[in-house]
Image: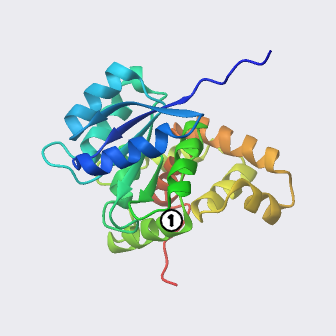
Amino acid sequence: MEETPTPIRVLLADDQALLRSAFRVLVDSEPDMEVVGEAGDGAQAYERARETRPDVVLMDIRMPGTDGLAATRMISADPELAAVRVVMLTTFEVDEYVAAALRAGASGFLGKGAEPDELLNAIRVAAAGEALLSPAATKGLIATFLAQGGGADPAAPAGGHAERLAALTVREREVLVHVAAGLSNDGIAGRLQVSPLTVKTHVNRAMAKLGARDRAQLVVVAYESGLVRPRSE
């Protein structure tokens, strides 16, 4: 007799109770996931994350008091919550918070106007350790870096990312460039004429060498290191 897979544990963080209720009904209707807690602000989200150890946090960016960005930084900085993935919920998927959310440790983005299936897929993708970074969000990230004059993070140590890039192989750098363009493993495999599994191996090695939590963090490193230069279309 096959064992029933452990449901994906989801924490909902949004200051709108009605929206949290709608998300709860949707998530709990799926056999492979369950809501383990709710929070109305960022500080509460962090505390609930420590209490419930969710696999995924659906985190609203804009909340009163401690906002979603601050809460995401707190979760990412807590060694006990290293396995927790945060998907940021935004009113507009492409907005000024995109780059900041990635730097804070978010694994991806989802617009609040997304279809139910998109939200459920986002939870599954994040729980699997992948990054939910849609083409629209990637374009938003690039636009933000352009607005910032190239995307360097003032808080990052000078040359930090560039030095770590030296540890990458030529192929790993090539894959990183494609990741920064928003391509999936299948898309990169098609470009490089290799198997998706080979691409996944290169991505995982690049994450390990660069100290990136996930694919979304690789995008930040690619731009901040100067490996990829933002440009207007």
Which residue is the site of mark 1? 138
Residue 86 position (above or below residue 47): below
117 relative position to 16: left or right: right
Please tell me which residue lies in front, 155 or 34: 34
- Measuring from the top left, give residue 191's x and y in whole percent: 79, 65
Q: Is residue 7 left or right of residue 49?
A: right
Looking at the image, which residue is at 56% across and 37% down?
127
Q: Nearer the viewer, residue 44 or 232?
A: 44
Observer able to see residue 105: no
Q: Residues within 10 Å of mark 1 (few under 14, many from 20)?
A: many
- 157 in relation to 1, above or below: below
Secondary structure beneath disc 1?
Answer: helix
Q: Position of residue 45 (x, y in %)?
A: 28, 34
Residue 74 x/y as whole percent = 29, 33
Judge left or right: residue 38 versus residue 221. left
Is residue 51 visible in the rendered image? The answer is: yes
